Image (tube, helix red, strand yellow):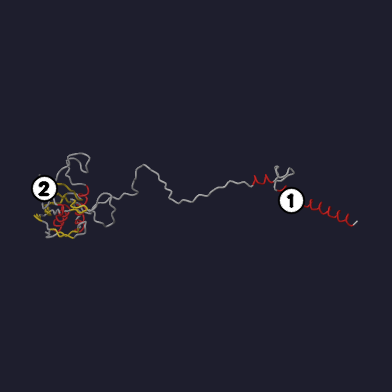
Amino acid sequence: MTKKVMAAGIGIVAVAAAVGGYFLFGGKQGKMGGGPQGAGGPGGMGGMAQEASVTVVKAGEPVTGDISLSTGLTGTVEAADVVYVYAKASGDVTAVHVKAGDIVQAGQILCEIDTEQVDSARAAAWMLLSGQAVEQVHITTPAGIPLALIPEEVVLEKDRVSCGIRKDGGDDADVTDGILIFAEVKRKEGAGVSITGGRGIGKVTAKGLEQEPGSYAINRVPRRMIREAVEEVMEIHGYEGGLLVTISAPEGEA
């Protein structure tokens, strides 16, 4: 009797172990894709092996370098601002200290000029309105150099004065270096300053220039400088009449 009970107990334990094994292993296999068809079926261990197969990718070594980007454009470059520069006195250019394309600063000396036409006109106007001869004319060049110029061949009359200033060509002397540039200043009817030319001053022969054909070749800037210099003398002496200025260079005649 006892052997039968033990045999029955062992059988119950075996059944329980089988059922428990099903739930423990069979259930997990079902969750992992296993099925009733066994290890060789779609849900068995073969399916697990297929799902576990992955492609192996090898990472490359990173490479450093520069990325360049360029572009090309065509067109016209225009200045944002244009500044017109002119000297405070007129005359012949004797030296140039810059070239096209240079960057310049305020106060920088760009060129040097001689100013005999203006200086002789100023001296003659001063002597005419003051009634007295002057021995020297003190000026400051555009380069900031003070000069004491000596009027030569002075002719002092009641209504007319003439004098000459000798041209100094500086470092860029030409065939006109050393000649006298004359200015004759005389009273005229009306008010203001008129400017004309005399011996040795050429005349305009072609159209399209600053002065009309037949006019003396004293351009706009020299005319303005001469006028301003004479008007300054007129203001100092309180003269409100008119003056005629004649510029000449007898030694410069061809």
Residue 119 location, quadrant: bottom left
Q: Who's the residue at 60% across and 46% down the image?
A: 54
Residue 38 location, quadrant: top right
State left or right for residue 50 relative to residue 89: right
In the rendered structure, which amino acid carries the disc numbered 1? Phe
Residue 254 location, quadrant: top left
Q: Earlier in the sequence, mark 1 or mark 2?
A: 1
Q: Outermost residue toward the right?
A: 1
Q: Residue 88 or 75: which is nearer the viewer?
A: 75
In the rendered structure, which amino acid carries the disc numbered 2? Gly
Q: Say above or below: 231 vs 212.
A: below
* Coordinates of residue 191 in the picture (x, y in percent): 20, 50
Label for residue 25? 1
Name the element at disc 1: helix
Which residue matches tag 2? 252
Label for residue 248? none
Q: Who's the residue at 57% across and 47% down the image?
A: 56
Q: Residue 254 or 111: which is nearer the viewer?
A: 111
